Amino acid sequence: MGATGPEGSAGVTVIERISRKEKVAYGFGDFGNGFMFDLGQSYLTKFWIDTAGIAPAVVALIFTLSKLFDACMDPLAAAFIDSRRFGKRGKFRPVMMVSSIVLAVMTVVTFTMPDVEMGWKIAFAAGTYAVWGIIYSFTNDPYGSLASVMTRDIKDRAELATSRQAGSLGAQWICGFAFIPIMMMFGGMTAQNYMFAAMIMAIIGVVSFYICYRGTKERVYVNRAVGFDKNGVKDYAKAIFTNKPLLALVLMTLFTISSMNVNNMMMIFFAQYNLGNIALQAVLNLVMIGASIVGIMFIPKMVAKWGKKKTAMAGFIISIVANGLNFVIPTNLWTFMILVTIGYAALAIPNGVTWAFVSDTIDYGEWHTGVRKETMTYAAFNFSRKVAQSLAALVGAGMLAITGYVVKATTQSTETLAGIKAVMTIYPAIALTIAAVIIYFLYSLSDEKYHAIAIDLEEGRWEHGIIGEEAPAATKA
């Protein structure tokens, strides 16, 4: 692991930079993640309802309870990972790599449905998805924590965030326009073909995680002796509730991720029934996510010019307006495609910046308490993502249940069509308005303040002294 606090010629602490190649390799992690995580968010609802025959209300309940369950498992995963000692292959990368292989297997299993009675189908769906969620924690928590020990440079972190968001959107893009055509190539949207298509995506996911594993390095020096043996519930609570910037991100994420997931989940229903052609789902995703991939490439320049917070606010405002207009304007393929593309691409900007925010809050937590808990801090953020996913499932599948969605029908009622459009448009507009208010008023860790914190940490200091020389318990919440 690299030395702490390298100094320049004038004795000023210099923060180590990382190569473009390593930034790209890091992005492959979320590229691989997307082939398993985003696959489930986009197609599992459709699979369970139309192919397995599970009622929409039950599907909403499965998603909600399963997500809440595995969100509660995040502290256990975090405690295990934070208790690991740093080895020659690092602290986070080995756990991430091994867990991604298990996650790939469970991804295929979740898209498998045995020919049994409905009660057993429901139990199988809920059980396998809950296990999938636990394994996801052991994959995503170390991956998210990895960025914080690759560099403390603000520009590099913005570029790592962009690389990660590009990887995520790239996987969404491919899954969005290729998953259904793969099934059609095998003969249709049958249970067996869902499993085959999921297997192809999962294999790509594991290969991508391997590229990330081989191409990244954990180089930021951390005094692991401090707080190493403290990884209980109290430490998890302390990592969260003494970290005000993290709390703001947790609240914001409830609304940003639920907005994105509702969009991904309901697009296939909107294309099939509101637009009358399920094949348009692939076209819409191709345009919408493709534009988002292009848009996020401007994040580093926007952050350099305006800072992370103002960049996020700009994305929120544009997405709120686009989604609001899409709700008001009568359904039309072209206006819907244009506005949903603008709204989704704009939302990708604050979602991308969020990854840099998270790394900053990890460092802030160490600076504020004198103890570094990367995975516990990231797990708290991940908890909010899982609750957001549960909220999205409740909104999307719940709406189908309330408005009388009819499985495998050629048309749906006016109420169902209106409900599908509402959760695709007005829900994101309202949710993102709340997210913008939260980040504007509650997130207080400016780029300037973070830079000073980063210098302190590079020199081995925390808020009240030298890390390891003074009792971290002296800190105040």
Image: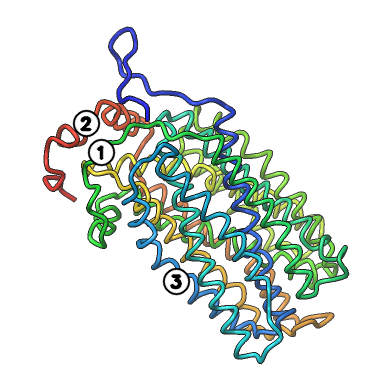
Q: Which residue is mark 1?
A: 367
Q: Amino acid at mark 1?
A: Trp
Question: With respect to residue 344, does 163 lie above or below?
Answer: above
Q: Which tag, 2 or 1, sits closer to the chain's start?
A: 1
Q: Which residue is mark 2?
A: 461
413 or 256, which lies in front? Answer: 256
Q: Which residue is mark 3?
A: 68
Q: Is residue 339 left or right of residue 257?
A: right
Q: Residue at x 59, y 52 (%)?
A: 33
Q: Residue at x 62, y 51 (%)?
A: 206
Asked which quadrant contains residue 420, the reply is bottom right
Q: CA distance from mark 3 to mark 2?
A: 37 Å
Q: CA distance from mark 3 to mark 1?
A: 30 Å
Query: x%, y% of residue 379?
Result: 39, 56
Determine whether the residue tagged by mark 1 lies in a helix, strand or loop: helix
Asked which quadrant contains residue 124, the reply is bottom right
Determine whether the residue tagged by mark 3 lies in a helix, strand or loop: helix
Q: Are marks 2 and 1 in contact (CB under 8 Å)?
A: yes
Q: Amino acid at mark 3?
A: Leu
432 or 398, which lies in front? Answer: 398
Query: x%, y% of residue 418?
Result: 70, 74
Asked which quadrant contains residue 278, the reply is bottom right
Task: Bin the neighbour count of mark 1 within 10 Å (Cα to Cα): few under 14, some 14-19, many 20 and up.
Answer: many
Query: x%, y% of residue 425?
Result: 64, 63
Q: Amino acid at mark 2?
A: Arg
Query: x%, y% of residue 393?
Result: 57, 71
